[in-house]
Amino acid sequence: MQHNRHSMLSNLFLFAGIGLFVGFVFGYPAELLSAGLLTWSLLQVKQFSRLNEWLHRDKSDAEPPECTGHWGDLFDDFSRQQKRTASREAFLRSVIKRFQQSSAALHDAVVIINDQNNLEWWNRSAERLLGFKTTTDRGKPVINLLRDPRFIRYYKRDSYEEPLQLPSPVNHEIELQYQITRFGKGDRLLVARDITQMLRLEQTRQDFVANASHELRTPLTVILGYLETFLDQELPRPLHRGMTQMQQQARRMQNLVSDLLLLSRLEATRQVTDEHPVQIQSLIQNIHDAATELARGKGHEFELDLDPQHDLLGQEVELHSAFSNLVYNAVRYTRENGRISIRWWVDQEGGHFSVTDNGIGIDAIHISRLTERFYRVDESRSSESGGTGLGLAIVKHVLSRHGGHLTIKSKKGEGSTFTCHFPLDHLMLVSVSEDDDLQDAG
């Protein structure tokens, strides 16, 4: 293109020079110069018209007009550029077509959401699983079509490390797992996967554990009843000692059965379906009082620090189970005359419940696996404490159902801190009357 520009300027000066020279020879310099420039301009207009007509043809593979000189070079340059552009467009069209074909074959719903939170594109499975309609829904806000409050809360939270499980808005017998990924400048890719079959298999496993645990409760109750009756009698020392150990192990098995039943129920669904405001200060106070009783004779010093202005939205029984597990663990694994700190506070990131002790601590290699069911840091220590190995697994599932997560900081020999984190949308300000009741109780 630069070469053609120089060539055109050279021809312009050539025509002007010829016009001036002839004008001086024959005595009409201005008229001849104007005539020469006019002739040159008409030639350029003609060639330009040919170029414009060729560029506006529908067929991109049409050969350029035959021409020599700088216009011929220009036509050739445009022709090569046009062919390169057509080749790139054909390649991109083939890529898009293959992507559409492959995405249409996916059983998972795939949805592209632009930076304005509007639906931009989706595959056929999205129509089947989410009910999107190509004729009416393109360009609409995603939260106007997926109106479940739990999805809206998940979408607006803008933190997608964990997937969201919800029934399909089209068919409530289909269970979907939503996963959102950010890409580009504020765009999102939403994938909804049908996990109904997987949940049915998991439900079969959970039902087996729950039923087996339930069936164990009755014989355990009978065994414990007889053991208590026998221990109330005067027995020879070896027999009394043996029955006492039997009673301890039967109670430990009873606790294990109870934890298995609770864990099976927690695993049945990922979200709490009956959320209610929980007076978190009163709940923690009750756990503190029970822990003080459990620690009687150990000389533990308890510290209690509670934010009085915020309650938590959730399921009280589950939260009590999670918080008490952490506090009772601190009592069990802290040596005599230890310190245990219990806190509830709220900041710009959400609500937080923490239990800190100066007990035996945990080696760093174990921390990532502590919430696995039946994982033992030390088998002998767990047996002595009477733990079931399910406490932290229960805590993890309770927090997950409440949109929260657990963090653990510990150093062997220096103690541990277990902190439950809850999102801001699960917090509620304490009402005036409720606050007054707490103050009166204090």
Image (cartoon, rainbow, N blue to C red):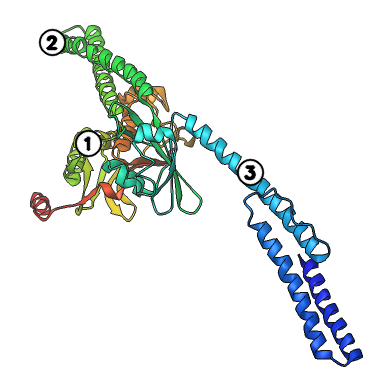
Q: Could you say whether the residue bearing mark 1 is in a helix, strand or loop?
A: helix
Q: Which dot, 2 or 3, sits closer to the camera?
A: 3
Q: Residues within 10 Å of mark 2 (few under 14, many from 20)?
A: few
x and y, in percent, of residue 116 in the image:
40, 54
Q: Could you say whether the residue bearing mark 2 is in a helix, strand or loop?
A: helix
Could you tell me how many numbered marks the image carries? 3
Q: What distance separates the C-alpha of mark 2 from that of mark 1? A: 32 Å
Label 3: which residue?
90
Which residue is pictured at 41% across the width and 25% down the height?
376
Query: Compared with residue 215, is residue 138 higher up or lower down, i.e. above or below?
Result: below
x and y, in percent, of residue 175 in the image:
33, 29
The reply to whether residue 245 is in sight is no
Taking the image as shown, residue 57 lies to the left or right of residue 164, namely right
Q: Looking at this view, is 357 or 99 the one in front?
A: 99
Q: What distance separates the C-alpha of mark 1 from that of mark 3? A: 62 Å
Label 1: which residue?
320
Q: Could you say whether the residue bearing mark 3 is in a helix, strand or loop?
A: helix
Q: Amino acid at mark 2?
A: Thr
Q: Residue 210's image quarter?
A: top left
Q: Quadrant of the N terminus?
A: bottom right
Q: Residues within 10 Å of mark 3 (few under 14, many from 20)?
A: few
x and y, in percent, of residue 290 in the image:
19, 36
Taking the image as shown, residue 33 lies to the left or right of residue 347, namely right
Q: Looking at this view, is 30 or 301 the one in front?
A: 30
Label 2: which residue?
229
Q: Looking at this view, is 288 or 146 the one in front?
A: 146
Q: Are marks 2 and 3 in contact (CB under 8 Å)?
A: no
Which residue is pictured at 24% across the width and 12% down the height?
216
